[in-house]
Amino acid sequence: MANSSRSPAPRRSEGVSQDQFLTVLSREDAIARFDAALFPRDVPAEERLLADALGLALARDIVAPLDAPPFDRSGVDGFAVRAADIASASEAMPVRLSLNGEVIACGVEPTETVAAGTATTIATGGPLPRGADAVIMVEHTQPVGDSAVEIRRSASPGQFVAYAGSDIARGEVLLRAGTQIGSREIGMLATCGVSRVAVARKPRVAVLSTGDELVQPGEPLRPAAVYDANGAVVSAAIAENGGEALFLGAIADDEARLEHAMRDALAVSDMLILSGGTSKGAGDLSHRIIARLGQPGIVAHGVALKPGKPLCLAVCDGKPVVILPGFPTSAMFTFHDIIVPVLRRMAGLPPRAETQVTAEIPLRVGSELGRTEFVMVSLVEGDNGLVAYPTGKGSGAVTSFAQADGFVRIDALSDHLPGGAQVDVTLFTPHVRIPDLVIIGSHCTGLDLVLAPLARTGLSARSLAVGSLGGLAAARRGECDLAPIHLFDDKTQTYNTPFLGEGFELVPGWRRMQGIVYRPGDSRFEGKSADEALAAALTDADCMMVNRNQGAGTRILIDKLLGQARPDGYWNQPRSHNAVAAAVAQKRADWGVTISTVARASGLGFISLTEEHYDFALISRRKSRPAVQAFLEALRSPASRAELEKAGFRPA
């Protein structure tokens, strides 16, 4: 039931000195020699329909072509309202609002403005109408005839509202090259309307078994013969790791026939894997044939592994040729340990890595009593081990599921998980890789340009957008390597440095222009200076703004501009630049503050306010980490600087 390993009397062959074989190398030296002979190399790509891309690796980064959701939408069935109108609402003292004459269902574009004292009936997924900044659940209301409704609970601005771009922001890297496409990734791509993707072509791997004694499964087993187990198991393992196996059967111990079979196999494949024939015996022919198949030939023959010592690694004119030991246990041990990383790299897939299942929750996670809750988390390496960082963006967000490594369970009898608790993480896949680099803070599309070179070298990076202040808090807790920030200090009139504490240092990033965005042709803004435009907006009662979330650097800038003024729309607080642009472009607001690159991509008018500093707070003790050093090198590289300038940023 196994392939055998044969060792008759040794002999010399083809003028090749026998002592070059079984010169045992360390595992690390063997891998280094094999990699040096094979890489770097391009990964062949092909375009496929999204439905046909399952299991394959992306050949190129995919940038989101639109915002998701594309408009502000309701997360529940209920009523679109102005939060200020129902601030005092309670069961004892409900607030009565007049109903507008439309019902907003999914796919229905609102036509009426929610004015003060009014509400509009809205279904889950319905677009938020102009003027509304919150949604109240129908369960917390009582109808009053056909023209009014009583609200029995208050709402905060943004309650049950999924803002445009809050899940996926147009222009951000949606999926990186090397990502293996599963059902979650297909959901993300379909959400953005992507129908075809460039994927890495599966490497074609020819599989040959060698030996007179081999019989294929299903055939009668003759005396002294064994079934060929390696052919089937190696072929299956190739398919599991991104390759396309071409099993060509078993070849008897005949040098001419074996050489012919090996040449034919190399002609139709990207890699050749044999099993058996790696020892020094006269019947072990494979390693001698390799010397005639191309350069540089054998790079390692004999590796300090148990099991797996007879492993032979070769490269023939750019194609890897591997001879695994004959015994299946040895063959599969060496295949998974040494060959799988090469195969996955050729397939454009990320390396496999082990992961743990116990991690620390860094923040208190609230839950609803009476309901078992599953919180999706991303795993990052903290100061004291794994940290399970909650990644939830709401029930309508496909990225929460796609970006998570697993989930934790909150019991129905608990109303929260305390910060610092050790929890069991249930993994979505058995091959989760803890990122080499973790960045938590303010998001910018320029960050994707700097991270791209790291991904191409095999380093994985995880970027979580929580705002500048949220990033600094995460850094102080030791949950990330760098925190992107753009915070202005009024006292010193400088950016970022005053916000750093002991143990941090500032890494200059780039400059980006913040400004007022408006729809082209709006006479309140067109051709005006920033002061003139702001004055026009504040004196026009019908001019509605869109704000940013508290904790964002842009929100600090907005509050400084407005002073004590609180114009209509102030409490509409989306969490991204893209959502601000979407609100203005879709006429749910007339103006807001965002960066020039987003304004340009959305076709909006732009009035410059200030060039802000987008920098990185670096935890000093993590500076020597290889991934951090790689990021710093990429940030300083001429290529990254050129890409940033091309995108509209000014490198520091």
Image: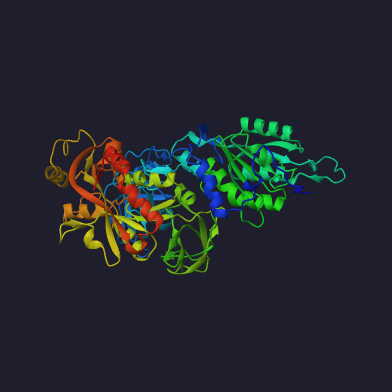
Displayed quadrant of residue 171: top left
Q: Is residue 616 above or below residue 577?
A: below
Tell whether 138 sits left or right of 217.
left
Tell whether 621 sits left or right of 295.
left
Q: Could you tell me if residue 570 is visible in this image? A: no
Instruction: Say how the picture is coloured.
Output: rainbow
- Residue 424, given in percent of the width and then of the height, sits at 53, 64
- Residue 310, given in percent of the width and then of the height, sits at 66, 50
Q: Could you tell me if residue 500 is visible in this image? A: yes
Q: Is residue 477 above or below residue 593?
A: below
Query: Going 77% across and 37% down the picture, which residue do you hit?
Result: 252
Q: Is residue 26 above or below residue 651?
A: below
Tell whether 203 sits left or right of 380.
right
Tell whether 545 sits left or right of 380.
left
- Residue 312, given in percent of the width and then of the height, sits at 63, 46
Q: Is residue 22 above or below residue 601?
A: below
- Residue 574, given in percent of the width and then of the height, sits at 32, 50
Q: Nearer the viewer, residue 510 or 97?
A: 510
Q: Nearer the viewer, residue 480 or 423?
A: 480
Q: Nearer the viewer, residue 224 or 562?
A: 224
Task: Count the marks.
Answer: 0
